Image: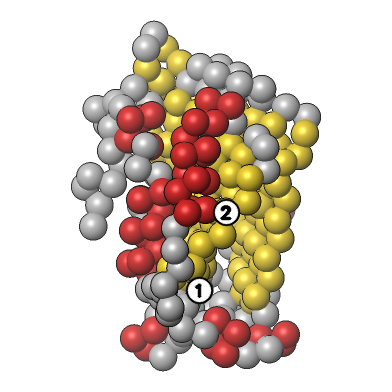
Amino acid sequence: MRVLAHELGTGAMASRLDARLSFRRVGAGTVIESVLATSPLRILTPRNHGYAAWAYTSTLGGGLVDGDRIRLRVSVARGASALLASQGHNRVYRSTSGCGSELIADVEEDALLAVLPDPTVCFAGARYEQKTVVRLARGAAALIVDVLAAGRGARGERWAFQRHAAELAVSVGHRMVLRERTLLDPRHGPLVERMGRFDALGTIVIAGERLRTARAALARELAGAPLPRRAGIVEQANDLGDALHIRFAAVSIEDAIHTVRARLHFLPELLGDDPWARRP
């Protein structure tokens, strides 16, 4: 594995240099071929007991501050299996001009990428933009999770950020199967009132031919599940042909995390190890 680390400031040079991470298959397993991490991003590459390679992101200072812009390019070579997760919650601090992150991933034929970050927590006054683009070759597969928490409720910061904008795009072959944009801005109405009793919003995308059976089983399960009055989780699933798109709202971040793990119960088998086994 080649590891390159750059400690860069906020000048023009930093804005032009993207962080990069590449995976390739070696024998029956996958290795991380190269890593380029640019400040404030850090990429950790722990070993695991499976045949997939794992990478975890973190940031200097434990979160994103005003002006931080993270751009990460990921490539997963043919036949490789990769997990991209985070070391902890993505904390976004108060800012005036805002901050953001961008992930662009290319997954080659017969490869698998699981994007499994911890929830994003926007503090009071935060302004955050997020973009995720996953491009799958025919025969490739991906699992993508995104969870937004209400904030630091114990400090009275429930849905108290200034702006949260997110874009998610997934393509299979040359066909765009999903392009979703979400904007939460109190100028469009008080967020606390609009979110009601829910403290987390989440998205799960399961894409690619390799995961067709898992998608079909999950779609049937969700279609037949009753919705109790004042349910702790409200879910909606959309079958997009090459992908299953699930959106949910949860009354607590704990319920959101439990939902993700329950819906992706088959993930440890795909990776050969359980990424949640040592997590709370």
Q: Residues within 10 Å of mark 2 (few under 14, many from 20)?
A: some
Looking at the image, which residue is at 52% across and 38% down?
Answer: 216
Label 1, on which residue? 122
Q: Quadrant of the N terminus?
A: top left
Q: How many marks?
A: 2
The amino acid on which the numbered mark 1 sits, given as a three-letter code, is Cys
Q: Secondary structure at mark 1?
A: strand
- Residue 155 found in image quarter: bottom left
User: Which residue does the image show at 47% across and 78% down from the upper left?
Assistant: 198
Residue carrying label 2: 237
Give the image location of residue 126, x and y in percent: 56, 77
Going from the N terminus, do you reach mark 2 or mark 1 first? 1
Q: Which one is nearer the viewer's eye here, 29 or 236?
A: 236
Q: Is residue 258 visible?
A: yes
Residue 62 seen in the current view: no
The x and y percentages for residue 209 are 58, 26
Q: Nearer the viewer, residue 100 or 257?
A: 257
Residue lying at 57% horizontally and 54% vertically, measured from the top left:
237
In the image, farthest residue toward the top:
27
Q: Quadrant of residue 73?
A: top right
**Label number found at residue 14:** none
Query: Where residue 69 appears, x then y in whole percent?
Result: 62, 58
Q: Residue at x 65, y 75 (%)?
A: 184
Badge 1: how crowded within 10 Å, few (<14), some, or many (20+)?
A: many
Q: Are marks 2 and 1 in contact (CB under 8 Å)?
A: no
- When the figure is inspected, residue 144 is found, relative to residue 147, above or below; the finding is above
Residue 191, quarter of the rendered image? bottom right
Q: Is residue 133 above or below residue 189?
A: above
